[in-house]
Image (cartoon, grey):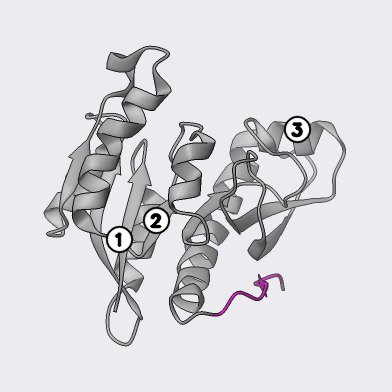
Amino acid sequence: MKRVAILISGGGSNMLALVRDMVGDHPCRPVLVASNDPKAGGLARAAAMGIATAAVDHRLYGRDRAGFEAALLEPILAAAPDILCLAGFMRVLTPDFVARFEGRMLNIHPSLLPKYPGLHTHARAIAAGDSEAGCSVHEVTAALDDGPLLGRAVVPILPGDTPDDLAARVLVQEHKLYPAVLRRYGRGERGLLDLTG
């Protein structure tokens, strides 16, 4: 059984989707939910489900990213995860941190990578006149929102869509895609899962 630690920054809706799927014949189990924000709503939700939680407030470290990551590593390493899942974790991790978990850290991103890495993905897709958007799951590398793609789901952009409209429809697909990819990843499958259609 693979041990999974999940990093969040907010309400943790993708974390909940992952945790709720990790039952029965799933090859993984959650062992920790950690956040860079002690007030992140997802921490209480995880604790209520009996999952260990930890919080390291990044604001206390100013520009000392290495210091923040060293503190964050303590509960992560204590939980001894086989896989680390970023689920709405809004801090850019240093190459040293990423290297420690190379080949076993996943992230979900609300665009069809390699399009629109970074923030404001839905607004950028609408502004570009794209006919579709979506979400991607990838292995994390030192480059932002880069790394081998493991899954994608396409969502049409409808006439009159606002970024919020599009974000809501993409989030529905995120909650399907990420658990499906983690289930396969836990079994050692690394091919691209396309949930489009």
Dot 3: element: helix
| Main SS category, magenta section | loop
Q: Which residues are magenta?
A: 189-196
Q: Residues within 10 Å of mark 1 (few under 14, many from 20)?
A: many
Residue carrying label 1: 81
| Dot placed on the residue nearer the N-terminal end, 2 or 3 | 2
Type of amino acid under label 1: Pro
Figure check: 103 above or below 121? below
**Image-based side of 25 in relation to 97, left or right:** left
- Mark 2 against mark 3, which lies toward the viewer? 2
Q: Position of residue 12 (x, y in %)?
A: 35, 46
Mark 2, other Cα within 10 Å: few <14 / some 14–19 / many ≥20: many
In x, y percent, where is residue 88? 45, 42
User: Pointer 2: what residue?
Assistant: 84
> Contact, CB < 8 Å: mark 2 with mark 1?
yes
User: Does the segment drawn in magenta span residue 150?
Assistant: no
Q: Alpha-carbon distance for marks 2 and 1? A: 7 Å
Amino acid type, label 2:
Leu
Residue at the extreme top? 62
Residue at image coords 26%, 38%:
41
Dots 2 and 3: beta carbons under 8 Å?
Answer: no
Mark 3 belongs to which amino acid? Arg
Residue at image position (26%, 64%) is 30
Give the vertical position of 187 relative to 181 (above or below). Answer: below
Secondary structure under tag 1 reads loop
Membership of 195 in magenta stretch: yes
Q: CA distance from mark 3 to mark 1?
A: 35 Å
Q: Which residue is mark 3?
A: 124
- Disc nearer the start of the sequence (3/1): 1
